[in-house]
Structures are given as structure tokens and as C-alpha cells.
């Protein structure tokens, strides 16, 4: 399941940004991904819709890495 | 560049807003520190990132339009026409045309029709009409789409309706620059008068876009604030440490701008002047302002230059101040660039703290608040400054205060990096 979420995240990012994110790992710092804040909101929204969950804004406040984000999403499943 | 030897005077003002449907009530409420923000009740907000808005309450559009006009035109036009009528009445020009006669350029109102135009702009137009007609087509097919669909949603419907009501034949259209729409419309109307394209312009802005989808859209871009401690009036808190976004608002502000010599000749009341304006772009990001405030600073410098004054002559500032974490930072950076050390000595009040963000209407309604400030020598407070952000070091007006200012600066910055600054002058 942990690996699946990283795959899902990379797919959502690719869908939003119309380019590949194959090099992303759980250690990648979100702000160094090369996506702006609006795109990040849209990626989270895509994951919410795909997984039928809601990730409250408070969950997103302290995330630094992609792995942090994946953990927060996993916790809501 | 030679600037023609005449000034642009303000000869009428009108508002329809969450703080009142006439300038007197609106101004009294601002001075008293009253908030127009309440809980959204028109649609459920449990899945939205904001639960509050500043709404126009108890305004009857039938006072300015027929029942049919109310239905086929968007809510934004109801407010705009309401404000325009007030402004024109104050200017002595509220003379609707004879519906049975075709307007002719040289009809004199007392002003020739072809010398009066209208730039009363909206950023989003008749959004509820768009929604309703899409739903109708989905339910009943395209034949059911109203023949008034396009005219109902087109942004220029606002200016068109004002021009139609009065038979104005001068320039009329719509300027859309998101949150700077109203300010740009005032600046461009002044420019048209200075260029000799009109002697009188009905200028301003309006918005009525507080719909579930719009609140969802702004909210999902993390631009909006929620009620604080169950209190909607605490959500809009420009320059405060705990600011978290803006509050959706609706309403309209209209000004009659007029060539000064023309106004004096016909004995029109002079309420103030639009003495300068500056228009620039950030060219940076679709929502984030330029991080160093360069674009906005340039707009302010251009406005001061056009007014023939320096930063030392400005006695009051009414900034854009939306209450977003980044927006307020960028704006203060811009202000520091222009005013330097003196910034901390210039009184500042953030109208949005009470009024919320009227979007296309913001610049116009806030310009009216600024003109009232200059006229009465009294500044309204900025509310919700429980803990002003220590990074800012500003002279924020926290209780209504007397001041003696001849010039004020009003500025706006719209999504997309559109900046507009006005120098307003006391009559």
C-alpha cells in the first residue's frame, strides 16, 4: 500500500502538470518538485477524488517531503 | 508627454454594499467599525474551505429596474445600476431617456449624450445566469437555453444597461482585471476624459459572484478565510498576524468623473479629484504577487508622478490589503519602496477588514471610502488587528481618527498581477 500511494501521487502529478515525475521518491522535498502551490492543491484534490477521502488543510501544514504527504493520505484511508 | 491642463473631478458617488445602500450609511458604518461579514446561508458550506461572506442584504432591485430586467440580468447589474443611479443623481444627471425616442448625440441632458460614457466594470459578470442556463440545457436540451443567456452573462452588460437607461453615447465597455477591475475602470475613465474622448464618465466596479462553485474555486486555491472562533466578523484581518485569506464579498461602487472645467461651468458639485493614476503588471504568477512588490510600487510611483506630487505629500493610504498571508507582505514591500522611512507615519486603514473583498467592486467602493476620508478629514478603522504582524511597522488606524490630508493613495492588485494605483485629492 505504501508503494501504491507513491505511484498514485506520481500519476496525479503527471496528470496535473502534463509531464512525467518518474524521478520522485518519498524523500523528495515537495517545494523542490517544480510545481506551484495551485498545482499541489490540484494534485491533492485528484488523490481525494481517486481514493474517496478528504484531506483536511491542517494535515498539509507541516509536510516537507512527498513521503510526509503520502503518510497523511494513508492515515485517512 | 504633455498632460492637458485640466483635472478630473468627482461629481457623484453611489454604493450598494454589505455596509449600506447609499454612501452616507456606508460611510457611517465604516467609521463605526461595523463589519458586513456574516455566515453564508444560501448554500451549505460544510464541504467548502470558507463559511463566510459579505453580502448585500435587503436591496430591492425593483427600485431601479423592471421585474423583467431583474430576471434577465444578473445580480451584479442590480447592484451596479443601483449605485450608478445614486451617483448620477448627485451629479445632477439622473435623467433617464425617453424610451420611445431614439437617443441622438446632440440631445442635451444638460450634457450632450455623446460626451458621456460608462466604464462600470465587473470581473466575473452574471455568474448565476451562466450556472442556471448550463443546468437548463443539461436537463432539457439546447432549445431551452434562453435568448437572454449571452446578454445576461457578458461582462459588458453592466455598462450597457447604464448607457441604455440614460441614452449615453460616449465610450462604454468593460475592463476586467480581477480585484483591480474597479480601480482600473476609474483610472481609464480619467484617461478618457483627459484625452478628450468624454467630458463625463460613470466609472466604477461591481461583483456578485458568491456562489457555491466560486467559493469552492477560490477556497480550493487556498485564498479564503473562515470564521474565527465561530465569529464571521473576525475572518477578514488585513495586516494581522493571524490573517489567513480574504472574505468573499459582493456589491457595487459608482463614481461620476468629469472634466473639472466642464463641471464648474455647469455648477456640478465637486466632491474630490482623481489627480493621478498608474497601471502596471507583475508579470510573475497567476495568483501570487511579485514577491518584492516591484509592479505595485511602480504603479504608485506613476500615479504620484502624474499627480505632480511626491511621496511626502500623501497623507493617507488605503491599500488593497486583502488579508492573505502573502498579499499583505508583498504590498507592504511595495509601500516601503515608495515611501521609505516615512511609511510608518502615514495613516493606513484596510477597508476590507469590514467590507470583505468586493472583487470587481472593491477598487471603486474603497476609492469612495478614501474620498469620504479626504472630504471629512477622518479615517475609518481597520478592525481585527488583535496582533498586528510585527514585520510590518505601519501606522494602522485602529479607531476612527481625524486627519488632515490633501492627497491619498488608493491601490489595488488583481489575480494575474494587474496593479492600479490612484491619487485622490480633496475638493
Image (spheres, coloured by chain):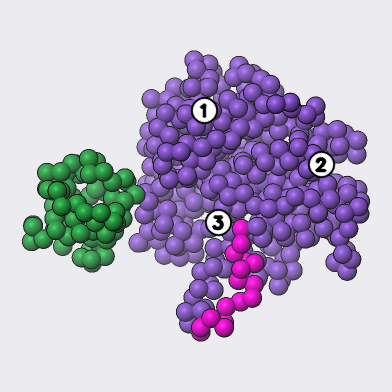
Chain colours: A green, B purple
**Residue B143 is inside the magenta segment:** yes
Chain identifier of the residue bearing label 1 in the image: B
- Badge number at residue B199: 2
**Figure check: B52 above or below B364:** below
| Quadrant in the rendering for residue B346 | top right
Q: Is residue B281 visible?
A: yes
| Label 1 secondary element | helix
Q: Which mark is drawn over residue B297? A: 1
Name the foreground residue: B382 vs B409. B409
Q: Position of residue B325 (x, y in %)?
A: 39, 38
Q: Which of the two discs, 3 and 1, labels the residue nearer the N terminus?
A: 3
Chain identity of mark 2: B
Tell me the magenta residue range.
B140-155
Answer yes or no: are tags 2 and 1 on the same subunit. Answer: yes
Assign a secondary structure to mark 2: loop
Residue occupying the point 32% across, 46% down:
A37
Q: Residue at x 26, y 43 (%)?
A: A34
Chain under callout 3: B
**Which tag, 3 or 2, sits closer to the chain's start?**
3
B291 to the left or right of B143: left
B368 with respect to B207 (left or right): right
Label 3 neighbour load within 10 Å: few <14, some 14-19, many 20+: many
Mark 3 to mark 2 CA distance (whole Å): 28 Å
Residue at the spot x=51%, y=79% of the render? B137
Q: Give the label on residue B124, or none.
A: 3
Q: Which of pointers 3 and 2 indicates the residue nearer the eye? A: 2
In the picture, the disc for residue B107 is none
In percent of width and height, residue B5 lies at 80, 27
Q: Is residue B42 above or below residue A34?
A: below
- Residue B253 painted magenta: no
Q: Are marks 3 and 2 on the same chain?
A: yes
Q: Mark 2 to mark 1: distance in Å? A: 30 Å
Amino acid at each position: 500500500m505504501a508503494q501504491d500511494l507513491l505511484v498514485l501521487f506520481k500519476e496525479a502529478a503527471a496528470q496535473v502538470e502534463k509531464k512525467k515525475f518518474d524521478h520522485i521518491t518519498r524523500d523528495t522535498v515537495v517545494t523542490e518538485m517544480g510545481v506551484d502551490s495551485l498545482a499541489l492543491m490540484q494534485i491533492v484534490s485528484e488523490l481525494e477524488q481517486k481514493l474517496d477521502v478528504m484531506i483536511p488543510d491542517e494535515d498539509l501544514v507541516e509536510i516537507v517531503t512527498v513521503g510526509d504527504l503520502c503518510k497523511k493520505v494513508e492515515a485517512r484511508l | 508627454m504633455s498632460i492637458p491642463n485640466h483635472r478630473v473631478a468627482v461629481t457623484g458617488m453611489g454604493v450598494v454594499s454589505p455596509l449600506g445602500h447609499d454612501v452616507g450609511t456606508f460611510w457611517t458604518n465604516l467609521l463605526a467599525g461595523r463589519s458586513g461579514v456574516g455566515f453564508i446561508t444560501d448554500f451549505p458550506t460544510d464541504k467548502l474551505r470558507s463559511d463566510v461572506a459579505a453580502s448585500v442584504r435587503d436591496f430591492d432591485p425593483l427600485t431601479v429596474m423592471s421585474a423583467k430586467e431583474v430576471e434577465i440580468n444578473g445580480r451584479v447589474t442590480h447592484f451596479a445600476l443601483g449605485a450608478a443611479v445614486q451617483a448620477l443623481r448627485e451629479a445632477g444627471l439622473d435623467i433617464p431617456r425617453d424610451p420611445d425616442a431614439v437617443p441622438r448625440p446632440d440631445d442635451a441632458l444638460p450634457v450632450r449624450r455623446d460626451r458621456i460614457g460608462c466604464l462600470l466594470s465587473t470581473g466575473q459578470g452574471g455568474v448565476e445566469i451562466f450556472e442556471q442556463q448550463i443546468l437548463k440545457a443539461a436537463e432539457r436540451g439546447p432549445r431551452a437555453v434562453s435568448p437572454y443567456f449571452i446578454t445576461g452573462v457578458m461582462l459588458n452588460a453592466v455598462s450597457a444597461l447604464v448607457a441604455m437607461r440614460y441614452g449615453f453615447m460616449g465610450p462604454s465597455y468593460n475592463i476586467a482585471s480581477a480585484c483591480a477591475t474597479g480601480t482600473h475602470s476609474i483610472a481609464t475613465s480619467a484617461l478618457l476624459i483627459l484625452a478628450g474622448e468624454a467630458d463625463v464618465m460613470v466609472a466604477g466596479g461591481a461583483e456578485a459572484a458568491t456562489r457555491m462553485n466560486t467559493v469552492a474555486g477560490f477556497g480550493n486555491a487556498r485564498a479564503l478565510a473562515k470564521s474565527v472562533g465561530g465569529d464571521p466578523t473576525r475572518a477578514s484581518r488585513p495586516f494581522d498576524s493571524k490573517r489567513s485569506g480574504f472574505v468573499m464579498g459582493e456589491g457595487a461602487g459608482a463614481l461620476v468623473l468629469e472634466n473639472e472645467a466642464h463641471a464648474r461651468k455647469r455648477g456640478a458639485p465637486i466632491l474630490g479629484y482623481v489627480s493621478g493614476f498608474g497601471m502596471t503588471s507583475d508579470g510573475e504568477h497567476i495568483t501570487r504577487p511579485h514577491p518584492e512588490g516591484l509592479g505595485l510600487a511602480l504603479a504608485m510611483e506613476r500615479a504620484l508622478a502624474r499627480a505632480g506630487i511626491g511621496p511626502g505629500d500623501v497623507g493617507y493610504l488605503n491599500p488593497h490589503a486583502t488579508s492573505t498571508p502573502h498579499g499583505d507582505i508583498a504590498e507592504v514591500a511595495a509601500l516601503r519602496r515608495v515611501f521609505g522611512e516615512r511609511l510608518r507615519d502615514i495613516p493606513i486603514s484596510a477597508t476590507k477588514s469590514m467590507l470583505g473583498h468586493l472583487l470587481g467592486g472593491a477598487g471603486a467602493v474603497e476609492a469612495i471610502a478614501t474620498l469620504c476620508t479626504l472630504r471629512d478629514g477622518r479615517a475609518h478603522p481597520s478592525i481585527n488587528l488583535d496582533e498586528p504582524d510585527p514585520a510590518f511597522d505601519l501606522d494602522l488606524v485602529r479607531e476612527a481618527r481625524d486627519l488632515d490630508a490633501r492627497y491619498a493613495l488608493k491601490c489595488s492588485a488583481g489575480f494575474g498581477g494587474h496593479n492600479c494605483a490612484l491619487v485622490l485629492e480633496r475638493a
